[in-house]
Amino acid sequence: MFWSKIFLPTLKDSPQDAEVISHKLMLRSGMIRRVTSGIYTWLPLGLRVLRKVENIVREEMNASGAQEVLMPMVQPRELWEETQRWEKMGPELLRIQDRHGRDFCLGPTHEEVITDLIRNNIKSYKELPLNLYQIQTKFRDEVRPRYGVMRGREFLMKDSYSFNLDEESLAESYLLIKNTYKKIINRLGLKFKIVKADSGAIGGDTSEEFHILAENGEDTIAVSDSSDFAINTELLLKDGEDLESFQGKPSPDGEGVIEIKKGIEIGHIFQLGRVYTDAMNVNVLDQKGKARNLFMGCYGIGVSRLVAAAIEQNNDDKGIIWPDAIAPYEVNIVAIGFDKDEEIAKAAMDLYNQLSSMGYEVMLDDRKDGYGTKMKDAELIGIPMNVIIGKQYLQNNEIELKHRDGQSSTGKVEDILTIFEHYKSS
Ligand code: ATP
Ligand code: MG
């Protein structure tokens, strides 16, 4: 992609209304634009990142044996009456009417729709366990939408639901998804903690959250400094524990002491038990031909929130530092004098074609600007590798490979290409 062609409206200064770093950087790097409170348009650069996150989530969900479906955003009131959530959800549920005056809501989550699907289509224990997922737009009329796509009103979620004959089978599905989430976040290149959590309005007993540790996290979590122990302090407060006093105490698992950290909740998994299947009367015939209500689990990942969380964890004063797996492009060719010097233009184009044919996703900065402006923009949008073709090339045929994290090497085009070949094969 050529810089002169891509729709990439970068901003020099931080917009006034952006409080946290990821929100500032997503606006400045031309990834998103606000339409209205908590509702955003994704521009080409941002959408590439969102799709990469989405694809990693999809690949790992498929690998776990889950099957993809796509449910509607608009859902009828009657289903929500069955679980009494039409009332319980309060003003977060956006209610709308059709031309006949019938009530609907915009789906904030899909337990009702999927439970209805299973109740009408699964008859026997032989068809279980079943794990279905979707990657779909949710709407929640949040009290305080803020931090850009981190807490939007409209956002992209991967939600999945397992249906199981008994508790043991539910525990197995839960563990499978938990391990799948670990794989997903590792592939994204992010540091995370699995945290014991409050199951809130969704209901059920066992639940854990996946948190990306970052200073701007909205959640406060208590973690052991030397084991995997971590708990959302919401849960401690509920149990009457004072927080403050939890700090510096020995960890309840006997390893290390407690530290208080900030986290961004990017995933949440629940063993719901029979909360929904009892309310909506979902049963199958078991081995003995007896009707049994199913056990259910639900598992969510905030796909759009993950993009913001990745930036919170990976940035410096110049801009974003994308983990390789989700960078919008892998290489950026900074051609200084592309418009004036044929030799530069030819070298840049050759390299662009070569790297593209090696399978790299490449940008070429063909704009009229000088080195300063081009490097500032490159650092802002955070492409992992920048190749500079300029004065040095004209003088002694050398180009520079500058990594976003600081390393750099200089050499002839062949030398730099060898480095790229090495990266592809490793
Ligand atoms: P929170 O506590 O942050 O409000 P939640 O517990 O209500 O989130 P869940 O119902 O567990 O959210 O939804 C699953 C995932 O969807 C969350 O872990 C989070 O990553 C994402 N998510 C939830 N609400 C939002 C939102 N308003 N904007 C973006 N992502 C969200
Ligand atoms: Mg949650």
Image: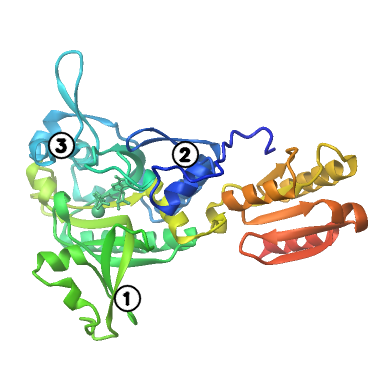
Instruction: Give above or below for 241 relative to 162.
Output: below
Where does label 3 land, which residue?
91
Label 2 SS: strand
Tell me which numbered mark, 3 or 2, is placed earlier along the sequence: 2
Alpha carbon distance from label 3 to label 2 = 27 Å
Residue 157, by quadrant, is: top left
* Pointers 3 and 2 in contact (C-beta within 8 Å): no
Tell me which numbered mark, 2 or 1, is placed earlier along the sequence: 2
Alpha carbon distance from label 2 to label 1 = 35 Å
Q: What quarter of the picture does the C terminus occupy?
A: bottom right
Q: Toward the viewer: 113 or 394?
A: 394
Where does label 1 land, which residue?
228
* Within-10-Å neighbours for mark 3: few <14, some 14–19, many 20+: few
Q: Toward the viewer: 252 or 117?
A: 252
Where does label 2 land, which residue?
32
Specify whether 105 is left or right of 182.
left
Question: Where in the figure is residue 87, as x and y percent of width and height?
Answer: 8, 37
Q: Is residue 359 visible?
A: no
Specify whether 131 is left or right of 380.
left
